[in-house]
Structure formats: C-alpha cells, structure tokens
Amino acid sequence: MRLIVSFAALFLSVIFLQLSSGGVGPLDALSGFALGFSKQEIGLLGSSHFLGFFIGCWWAPRLMGSIGHSRAFAAFTALGAMGLISHTLIEDPLFWAAFRIATGLCVAGCYTVVEAWLNDKVTNENRGRAMGTFRIVDMGASLGAQLIIAVLPPAWYVSYNLLALLCCASILPLTLTKASQPQTPDAPRLRPKLAWACSPLAVAGVIVAALSSASFRMVGPIYGQEVGLEIGQIAFFLASFVAGGALAQYPMGWLADKYDRRWVLIWLSGAAIVSCGTTMAASDTGTLGVMLAAGFFGFTSFPIFSVSAAHANDFASGDQRVELSAALMFFYAIGAIAAPWVASALIEFYGPSALFAFVAIGHLALIVFGLTRMSARPTLSERTPYRYSPRTSFSMGRYLGRNRSDKGK
C-alpha cells in the first residue's frame, strides 16, 4: 500500500493519459467511417499516430533535459489536447492525420517522463512490485480506453472534448505532487544496428508484434464495422484483444524462461496464425464467438514483443541493455507506422478478412526466419529473466535494464 501511495500521482496520470490516448484510435476509425473517409485514409490516421510516437520517443528525453520533467509533461499533454480538440474544427483526413501526430507525440513524451520519474524513485527492494503495479495500471487503463468508445458517439465534438479533458486531467497529479523532481538521465543513444547484432530474430519479432498490434488496434474498428458489429460491440471486441494479451503474460513468461525462446516465438507465431483463421471464421458465429476469437488473437500475438525483447537481452551485456531497448522500440515504431495504412489498403481492395490474412503472413514469415536462425547459433544456457516490456518509450529500457541486471543471467 505504501508503494501505491508513493507513486499515486504517477499512476493516476498514466490512467488519465491512457484513457485519452487509447480511446482516440478507435474513435477516429469509427468517426472516419461515419464521415465517409476511405479505409486507406482511416489507416493513415493510425500510421500518423505512430509517426508522432516515434518522433516523441526521440525528442522527449532531450526536452526533459532542457526544461525538467513537469514542464515537459505539461508541454506534451498540451500538444495531445490540442490535437484532440482540433478534430472538431475541420473534417478532413489529412488534417486529422496531422492532429494524430500531435497525439502520438503526447503519448511518447508523457510516458518518457513518467518512466524516468519511476526509474529514479524505485529501489532494488521495491522494483518488482513497482513494475507489477505499473503493468496493472497501464493495462487496466488500456482496457478501459477500448470500452470507453461504447459511450462516445463517433464524429461528435463532445466525444473529442471529453478525451481532451481526460488528457488535460493527466497534468494535475504529476504537476501538483510535492515529490521532488528526479535527476534527468542522459538520453539513450539510438543504435538500431545493436539490436540486429544481438538478435536478428528479435528484430523480426518486434516488427511482427507491431504489425499485429498496430493493425488490430487502429484498423480493428473497420473490421468490426465490416462484419456487422455495433459500436458497443466493437468496444468489447477491442477490449477482448487487450484482455487476452494481459492473460497471456504469465504463462508465456513461464514458457520463455523454461524453454528455448526461439521455439516459444515460433510456436506463438504458429498459434497466432491459427487465431487469425479463427477470428476470420468467427465473423459468422455471433457476437460471443467474435469476442472469444479476438481474445485468442490477443493471447497469441501480444506477448511476442516481450519474448523477442527477452531473447535479445540474452545476447547483450549489462551496459548495452538500455540502448538495446531503445533500438527494439525503434524497429517496433517503424513497423507500427507502416502497418495500419497497409492493413487498411488491403481491406479496401480485398475485404475485412484481409486484415487477419496480412497479420498471418507476417507471422508465417517470422516462423520461417526463426527456423533459419536456429541453425545460425545455439541458444544460451544462462538467460535473463523474462519481463513484460511495455511499448511506451525509448527510456523504458533504463528501468528494465536495471531490473535484468539485478537478477541477471
């Protein structure tokens, strides 16, 4: 309880931020559909979000070092609120894409501040509990963000104003806390080659994880509309994906620590292909079948990022892990920028089932590449512990790196 109280301001800010930023993706997709945007234009909105996210990951540590944590958090939150409110001023997909860059900047910047603050304040004694609490808060708020669109009518200015109010509310806990601001850490160097040098399979894994998650979360509402789901049902459809991913963390972590992580990735991808086929087949089985299929898809695809990150860390030294995490996030962001637009274009030309066919092809490629890599070098007998890896900022690796070093291989 003392831990929760000491980090209450951080966690409350995360809840408000996640409710706001997590709700805008599906709301934009449904609003674009209602306003007559093409499916490719709706996909462009999701890609623009991740473009802003990528820029924010790179810029946030530098801004934080110049003006401090609280001011940087307020600046990024203001950008996010402006991007949300601006949706009500003009109904044009290109302008909305620019507004989504602002919301992506907000997410990356705010999470960078929160994680830097958290990393500075935790100790070796409470690090595991702090990480567990952060994971519960983040995933719980993400689940709530998917459900919130059930009560937010699309293409209505009040809906975007409410999300903007939640975004603004995230400023209050962090800026009003009496806790002293932490020291600003050096921004991690961005070295994509480091991730490839440590594990080409891990790089492929995080790209496929981005392809799965970004496509589903940004374009999934289009799929839901195409297969006849109501708005409230689409909210539960997206929430089922998040819930399935949350439930998968413990069993997949146990498997990743007990068995060769390359085989875990390969079997996860095989299961993800099955779940893609199940989700496509479930479109005619009724609402319950669609929800269960989405949960199965989340269960099989969501852990791939964390398993890939754990595998890469097995081949990294302690002083490389912060930069390795940033490099893996770089590849995730690249995949996430491309995936929503490509998925929406495929739906435009080939129908809603093309979304899961696209994801299945990505996982099939990961299986083939994983089998190829297994002949390149043996696995290690001593490995780093599996850790759930949030895909929130380049700086999260500083916290996870210290956690792995404390209990290292």
Image (cartoon, rainbow, N blue to C red):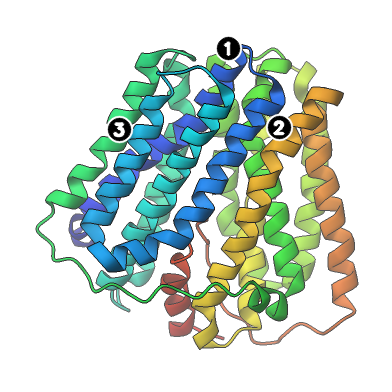
Q: Disc 2 marks which amino acid?
A: Ala
Label 1: which residue?
A: 35
Give left or right: position of 338 versus 243.
right
296 vs 229, nearest the viewer: 229
Q: Secondary structure at mark 2?
A: helix
Q: Relative to 122, is 96 above or below?
A: above
Considering the image in quadrants, where does the N terminus appear? bottom left
Q: Residue at x 63, y 27 (%)?
A: 42
Considering the image in quadrants, where does the C terminus appear? bottom right
Label 3: which residue?
A: 166
Q: Residue at x 58, y 33 (%)?
A: 45
Please tell me which of labels 2 and 3 falls first in the chain: 3
123 vs 226, nearest the viewer: 226
Please tell me which of labels 3 and 1 falls first in the chain: 1
Q: Relative to 233, is 336 above or below?
A: below
Label 2: which residue?
A: 293
Discs 1/2, front: 1
For residue 319, which numbered disc appears in the image?
A: none
Q: Disc 3 marks which amino acid?
A: Leu
Q: Disc 1 marks which amino acid?
A: Leu
Q: Secondary structure at mark 3?
A: helix
Residue 157, position in %: x, y?
38, 15
